[in-house]
Image (spheres, rainbow, N blue to C red):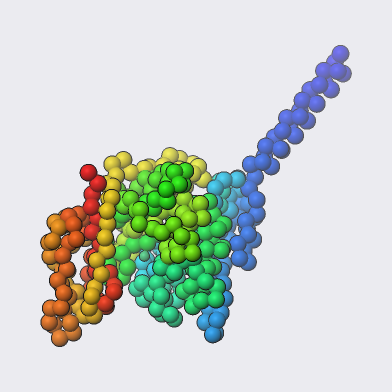
């Protein structure tokens, strides 16, 4: 009898061991490969995605992959689509040191500086090699100019590889901007519900309900919109301004990302969603009709009423050429705060608060 009992005990033990090993193997993450980087579970690695050369001009995109020991979601965090937008860039370098791959579930793809040529030359909006705006040329083109090729590499190696994406922006070097986010509506309820949770989890109170983005993937234009059109819930965030490196904006970016990660159960803890969001149901960017100097007459975050004078433009001789008025009543989400302006460039953005 004793012999039979001990046999049953050892069989039970083996069964439990087998089940434990089986569930462990189910939970254990896979190796994540992107570009030349091969990252084992529980490991973090940094390197470059290369943007192929054409006419002797190529580029590199510095990235870090933090691959959690346990299975989970793949979250892509993209900074530096505009190279003069520093707080998101600084936030990702700091975040990289904060996340332990041993305790992470899922995978983080950190794109540190998407538009390296713009960053290196300290240029707002554009890439100095072709004067294109990276956040207007998605989904990119491998045969196109440098900016188009950068977009293509980001789409192939980052957007297509992730489950969710946060495209991190701020006021460019010339833009005074209050923190806000874009919640892009795709009309696919499943996607929109997830991205709504993401935008709330990020914790910034002003949220634009953005129904203006195209649904044609070949013309997706924006990094975030490309992700949404590829069925990857995504948000675009704006925190920081005027080319500054202020701590408050950097910390707001980090807190937002950690909260989104908690929402997706990638790290321990509860997300801290914004409790009382200010929804913005209409927005408009007003552009310059002239080359010259812009003089703002109001400030970021101020309320303007329809027809109110918001600023004016003079030519290079100081003659007033254009007066800018608010197209409708709302708040100034951003306004250009340095003098240079060129025809076709943005001057300010107004958002209408949803009743
Ligand atoms: Zn930007």
At 27% from the left edge and 63% from the top edge, which residue is drawn? 285
Which is more toward the observer, 34 or 12? 34
**Viewer-nearest residue: 245 or 135:** 135
Residue 47 x %, y %? 57, 67
Residue 252: where, in percent of width, then height? 35, 53
Q: Is residue 60 visible?
A: no
Q: Report the residue at 43% width, 80% height from top.
A: 130
Quarter of the image for residue 16 reads top right
Quarter holding the N terminus is top right
The residue at 48%/72% (across/down) is: 148
User: Along the line of sight, which residue is nearer the eye, 158 or 239?
Assistant: 158
Position of 12 with respect to 93 (left or right) is right
The tally of labels here is 0
Ligand 1 image-quadrant field: bottom left
Question: In the rendered image, is residue 261 in sight?
Answer: yes
Which residue is at a point 55% across and 76% down the rendered structure image?
A: 143
Give the image quarter of residue 333.
Answer: bottom left
């Amino acid at each position: 009898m004793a012999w039979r009992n001990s046999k049953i005990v050892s069989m039970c033990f083996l069964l439990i061991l087998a089940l434990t090993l089986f569930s462990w193997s189910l939970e254990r993450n896979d190796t994540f490969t992107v570009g030349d980087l091969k990252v084992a579970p529980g490991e973090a690695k940094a390197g470059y995605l290369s943007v192929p050369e054409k006419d002797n001009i190529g580029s590199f995109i510095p990235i870090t992959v933090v691959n959690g020991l346990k299975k989970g979601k793949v979250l892509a965090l993209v900074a530096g689509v505009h190279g003069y937008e520093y707080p998101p860039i600084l936030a990702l370098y700091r975040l990289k040191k904060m996340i332990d791959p041993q305790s992470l579930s899922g995978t983080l793809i950190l794109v540190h500086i998407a538009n390296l040529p713009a960053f290196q030359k300290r240029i707002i909006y554009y890439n100095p090699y072709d004067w294109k705006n990276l956040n207007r040329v998605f989904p990119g083109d491998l045969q196109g100019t440098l900016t188009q090729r950068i977009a293509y590499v980001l789409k192939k190696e980052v957007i297509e590889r992730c489950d969710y994406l946060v495209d991190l922006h701020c006021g460019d070097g010339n833009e005074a901007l209050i923190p806000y986010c874009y919640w892009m509506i795709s009309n696919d309820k499943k996607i929109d519900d997830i991205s709504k949770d993401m935008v709330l989890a990020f914790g910034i109170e002003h949220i634009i309900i953005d129904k203006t983005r195209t649904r044609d993937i070949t013309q997706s234009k924006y990094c975030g919109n490309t992700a949404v059109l590829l069925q990857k819930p995504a948000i675009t965030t704006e925190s920081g301004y005027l080319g500054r490196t202020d701590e408050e904006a950097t910390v707001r970016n980090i807190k937002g990302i950690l909260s989104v990660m908690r929402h997706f159960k990638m790290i321990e803890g509860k997300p801290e969603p914004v409790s009382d969001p200010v929804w913005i149901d209409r927005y408009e960017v007003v552009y310059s009709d002239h080359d010259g100097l812009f003089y703002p007459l109001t400030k970021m975050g101020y309320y303007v009423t329809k027809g109110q004078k918001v600023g004016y433009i003079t030519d290079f001789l100081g003659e007033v050429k254009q007066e800018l008025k608010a197209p409708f009543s709302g708040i100034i989400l951003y306004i250009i705060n340095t003098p240079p302006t060129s025809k076709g460039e943005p001057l300010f953005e107004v958002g209408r608060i949803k009743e």
